[in-house]
Amino acid sequence: NIKLFCFLIENIYKIMYYIIGVDSVDWLDIKEFIKDSIKYILFVLTIIIIAVYVIGFNQVIGSSMNPTLNNNDVLILDKLVYRLKNIKRYDIVAINDEQSKYIVKRVIGLPNDKVVFKDNILYINDEKITEDYKIGTTEDLEVIVPKDMYFVLGDNRENSSDSRDKKIGFIKKENILGKIRIKLWPFNKFKIY
């Protein structure tokens, strides 16, 4: 083991001499190099952690969120907010549905809410709600949102696969990836939510 260690040190010195032109090894320079390398590694790890656990990017596919969001809009997603706070009614959220698709919808019904559409008017827990963000009409329906589930809709009610669709249905909290915070693209329609 000692012979191997000596061999490695001697060869590292030779490599430094021939390639870099170093006549003697300055251990202080090596320490400085290691310190700088650790700083860069920590910076890269911080960026990776932020990208995986704190923020994300989503792209709107389709017109189900018109007029609020349009096809190909690029959004910044806050992945941390719902680990610290409860999901709120009217939040625009990114969802990982059961079919491995990422969809963007608006939260309408919270757990245990009674959601009713009658004559294209929304009632939540028997209170009439004004929806100034939606387009289109909604067929009459009445649902009770199960515990730990959410009822979500697209703003373009006539062109949206959402909780009214049996393929999607109610959304589990763990399937909500986060809250849409910023419309980043197109730049001329930049908006903070």
Image: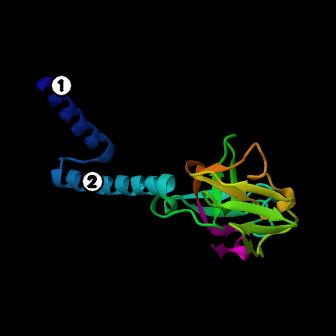
| Element on which disc 2 rests | helix
Q: Residue at x 72, y 47 (%)?
A: 169
* x and y percentages locating residue 167 in the rendered image: 76, 42
Give the left or right position of residue 156, taking residue 81 as reference: right
Q: Is residue 150 above or below residue 167?
A: below
* x and y percentages locating residue 39 in the rendered image: 32, 57
| Pointer 2 residue | 33
Q: Does the magenta stretch include residue 176?
A: no
Residue toward you, 156 or 102: 156
Asked whether residue 22 is in view, the answer is: yes
Label 1 close to label 2 by CB (< 8 Å) = no
The image quadrant where one finds the N terminus is top left
**Residue 4: which numbered mark, if any?**
1
Q: What residue type is labelled 1?
A: Leu
**Residue 154: which numbered mark, if any?**
none
Q: Residue 135's image quarter?
A: bottom right
Please identify the dominant SS of the magenta region.
strand
Residues at marks 1 and 2, CA–CA distance in whole angstroms:
24 Å
Q: Residues within 10 Å of mark 2 (few under 14, many from 20)?
A: few
Q: Which residue is drawn at 72% across and 61% down?
A: 115
Q: How crowded is mark 1: few (under 14 residues within 10 Å), some or many (20 or more)?
A: few
* x and y percentages locating residue 153 in the rendered image: 74, 59
Q: Which amino acid does label 2 sit on?
A: Phe
Asked whether residue 106 is in view, the answer is: no
Q: In this view, does 180 lie above or below 189?
A: above
Q: Give the range drawn in magenta.
A: 179-193
Give the left or right position of residue 70, taking residue 85 as reference: right
